Image: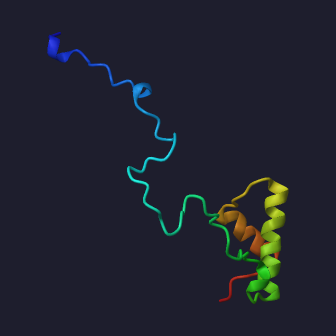
Amino acid sequence: MSEDATPKPEADRRSASDRRQGDRRKKQVPVEVDRRAADRRTGPRRKRSMNQYDMSEDVLEFINAISHFKEASGRSFPTWSEVFAILRGLGYEKRS
C-alpha cells in the first residue's frame, strides 16, 4: 500500500467552537421581532373531531366495527380481507 492510500484522520469536531454558546451575530443590530424567544403556539388550536363531519349511521357503525376489531385483535391496521370480513359481519352484500 502506498503512502497516498493511507487514510487521513478526520478533523476533531471537539476542538471547534460550540455554536450553542451565546449570540452568534456579528453586530448588535436591534431586530423588530425576536422570533427565537417567541412562543409559536399563540393562536387558537383547532382540534378535528368526528362531530365536525356529517356521517350517516352506516358510516358510524362501520367505524365502530373497525375500532372493535382493532381492540380485539391488538392490531392497528387490519388487512383488506379482514375489512371485507367486518363488512360481511355487518350484513353488507354485493349487489348484482
Residue 83 percent coordinates (x, y)? 71, 68
Q: Quadrant of the C terminus?
A: bottom right
- Residue 78, compared with residue 47, is above or below; it is above
Q: Nearer the viewer, residue 29 or 85?
A: 29
Colour option used: rainbow
Q: Nearer the viewer, residue 74 or 8?
A: 8
Q: Quadrant of the N terminus?
A: top left
- Residue 48, compared with residue 67, is above or below; it is below
Picture quadrant of residue 91: bottom right
Residue 3 percent coordinates (x, y)? 16, 11
Q: Nearer the viewer, residue 2 or 14?
A: 14
Q: In the picture provided, is 34 more to the left or to the right than 77?
A: left
Q: Can residue 91 be seen in the rendering of this structure?
A: no
Q: Can residue 94 be seen in the rendering of this structure?
A: yes
Q: Give the residue at x 69% y 59%.
A: 77
Q: In the picture provided, is 35 more to the left or to the right than 45?
A: left
Q: Give the residue at x 75% y 90%.
A: 54
Residue 7 percent coordinates (x, y)? 26, 18
> Looking at the image, how many numbered discs can be counted on the residues?
0
Residue 48 percent coordinates (x, y)? 72, 77
Q: Give the residue at x 44% y 47%.
A: 24
Q: Give the residue at x 77% y 70%.
A: 86
Picture quadrant of residue 66: bottom right
Q: In the picture provided, is 37 more to the left or to the right than 62?
A: left
